[in-house]
Amino acid sequence: MTAASDAPRLSARALSAGYPGRRVIEGLDLEITPGRLTMIIGANASGKSTLLGTLARLRPPLEGAVELDGVDVDTIPRRRFAQVVGLLPQHPTAPDGVSVAELVGRGRHPHRGVFQRWSEADAAKVDEAMAWTGVTDLADRPVGDLSGGQRQRAWIAMALAQDPRILLLDEPTTFLDLTHQLEVLDLLRALNRSRGTTVVVVLHDLNLAARYADELVVMAQGAVVAHGAPGQVLTEDVVRDAFGLDALVIPDPLTGTPLVVPVPHDHPHLNDHLHLHRTPERNDTP
């Protein structure tokens, strides 16, 4: 496993990002902790995907910079950057008829020159990535014929074949049933633990994020409002401020991680419940 001290550092410095005529993120500072599994959470339109896309160089910053080991990524050749940082976007698409093996093989592009032939090392990386994600038996199947869970594992295999030190994923569990969501998150955690790959995931499900993440980045209105271990940052106050949601935050009975339990607005004893079950961070000092 790669030591965190040896892992590359991806960070945003005074970052403003968005689209022509519309800023989504303004003056954001964030350092992704190397060698950890970080989940970015927040309400819709909070800036999660904009942040991830800007970190991945899909769009240039409006102001500020994204840095890799302290170097502005705009000064790093794209092929070199792609050898270190991999991205799985929210809605990846593959050409009609492309097989799983062909799709995974595309992950080797950053490591091959324009005229460089396919090598044994490339084949070994593809085989390893397919074995890791359990799609070896699907190698000859068209990607379009796969189930949602199989297709997502094939895309993750392509990202792994890229052999990145940092892997960014935007909503990798979207449209998957709960069983396949857990399968994907188990895979990402295993990748992080065994290889030391820094994994950054945008996720909507607060409870799954809290269960799997080493660190949470909570966003609201284009800003980071909390960053740290799930037990430290996922409090009732943060949930209310970032999501506009009244909820109890209690220990998960299986893992001890924060478990967010929404309280219906028409609950007859809403205020009593919020008072009696306040998280320790919010208890009044005697």
Image (cartoon, rainbow, N blue to C red):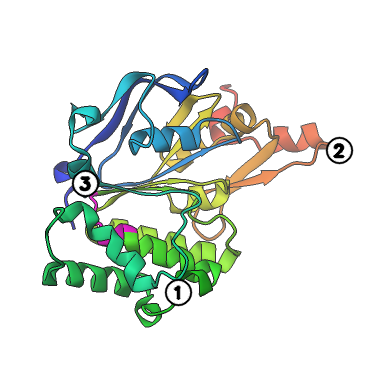
Q: Quadrant of residue 28?
A: top left
- Residue 144 counted in the magenta span: no
Q: Quadrant of residue 30?
A: top left
Image location of residue 88, percent across then percent down:
40, 51
Outermost residue, front side: 115
Residue toward you, 238 or 58? 58
Gap between marks 2 and 1 measured at Cα: 49 Å
Magenta stretch? 159-165
Residue 172 lies left or right of residue 128; in this view the side is right
Secondary structure state at the residue bearing disc 1: loop
Of the numbered discs in the image, which one, if any, rests on residue 142? 1
Secondary structure state at the residue bearing disc 3: helix
Outermost residue, bottom side: 137
- Report the amino acid beneath label 1: Pro
Quadrant position of the C terminus in the picture: top right
Residue that carries the numbered disc 3 in the rendered image: 84
- Front: mark 3 or 1: 1
Residue that carries the numbered disc 2 in the rendered image: 266
Image location of residue 199, percent across then percent down:
34, 49
Q: Quadrant of residue 67?
A: top left
